[in-house]
Image (cartoon, rainbow, N blue to C red):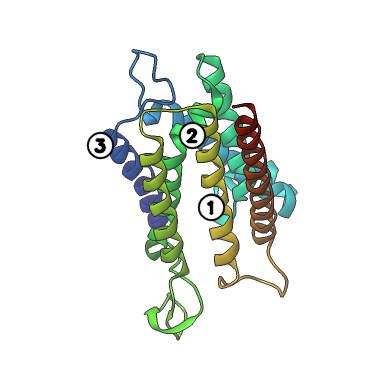
């Protein structure tokens, strides 16, 4: 049986970033190369690897016996772990960049705005999957099976992430440097982590405590804040050193 809602979401999260990349241009972090590169050339392998890892990690923690069944593994709707999958996708993208002689930081930065847009599209298309959940609200959407309307938290997350994607793409332009690439990557990870962490407070879940996905997002949000503060401190020290030298 085909999961029509999930299929629509997957088609949208691939087609929208690809169309946007064609509109604004995409170089894959290799400005000095004359060989054209498309977003699909550098993003499909990390996407597939990340999705597979996210599903396998979820089964490994929740239902190891299911790893013996190809059918169970293939049912993505049954659960995936976002952050482990994202980590594997990053490793694959970085390795692919290194293999073709592109700086991994530049490659990851060039992909980041389009990855964020894909994630925003996935959140926005919650309406065609299980429904858009959130806190009870007089203004909102009533997911199937519920008697009250709920404020669509996923749509707010989609707007925040999509706006960040557009800003980062304009910031990056066609000029990259080590510091700018690192900044773009940091902002992308931080925005997704904080957005997921905040949204999780209002999303339904089983049990009284936070879910594993919520804990992951909170931890990575904290790590992103720490890295950002450390980077700002180092940049300030370099600036002071330069002023003293001059």
Q: Position of residue 63 (x, y in %)?
A: 72, 53
Label 1 CA crowd tier, 10 Å (few <14, some 14–19, many 20+): many
Mark number for residue 192?
1
Q: Position of residue 135 (x, y in %)?
A: 51, 79
Label 1 element class: helix
Vertical position of residue 69 compared to residue 206: above or below: above
- Residue 208 placement: quadrant: bottom right
Look at mark 2 in the image and give the residue it sits on.
Answer: 109
Picture residue at 57% right of the left edge, 26% below the top: 94
Mark number for residue 23?
3
Label 1 vs label 2: CA separation? 15 Å
Vertical position of residue 137 compared to residue 49: above or below: below
Label 3 element class: helix
Specify the quadrant that holds the C terminus. top right
Single out the mark in the foreground, 2 or 3.
Answer: 2
Vertical position of residue 11 compared to residue 199: above or below: above
Label 3 vs label 1: CA separation? 24 Å
Q: Position of residue 42 (x, y in %)?
A: 44, 27
Residue 177 visible in the picture: yes
Residue 69 visible in the picture: no
Image check: 126 left or right of 75? left
Picture residue at 42% right of the left edge, 62% below the top: 126
Labels 1 and 2: the sequence-earlier one: 2
Label 2 CA crowd tier, 10 Å (few <14, some 14–19, many 20+): many
Picture residue at 55% right of the left edge, 25% below the top: 104
């Amino acid at each position: 049986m085909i999961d029509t809602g999930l299929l629509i979401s997957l088609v949208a999260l691939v087609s929208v970033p690809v169309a946007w990349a064609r509109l604004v241009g995409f170089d894959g972090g290799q400005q000095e190369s004359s060989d054209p590169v498309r977003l699909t050339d550098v993003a499909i392998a990390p996407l597939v690897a990340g999705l597979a890892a996210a599903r396998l990690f979820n089964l490994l923690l929740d239902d190891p016996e299911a790893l013996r069944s190809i059918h169970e593994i293939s049912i993505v709707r049954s659960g995936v772990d976002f952050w482990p999958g994202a980590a594997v996708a990053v490793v694959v993208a970085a390795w692919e960049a290194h293999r073709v002689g592109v700086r991994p930081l530049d490659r990851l930065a060039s992909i980041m705005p389009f990855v964020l847009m894909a994630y925003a599209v996935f959140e926005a298309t919650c309406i065609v999957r299980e429904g858009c959940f959130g806190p009870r609200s007089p203004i909102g959407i009533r997911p199937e099976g519920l008697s009250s309307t709920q404020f669509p938290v996923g749509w707010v997350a989609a707007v925040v992430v999509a706006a960040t994607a557009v800003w980062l793409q304009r910031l990056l332009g066609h000029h990259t440097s080590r510091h700018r690439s690192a900044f773009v990557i940091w902002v992308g990870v931080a925005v997704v982590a904080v957005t997921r962490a905040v949204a999780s407070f209002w999303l339904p879940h089983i049990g009284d405590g936070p879910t594993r996905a919520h804990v992951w997002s909170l931890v990575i949000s904290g790590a992103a804040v720490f890295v950002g503060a450390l980077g700002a401190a180092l940049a300030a020290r370099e600036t002071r050193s330069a002023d003293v030298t001059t």
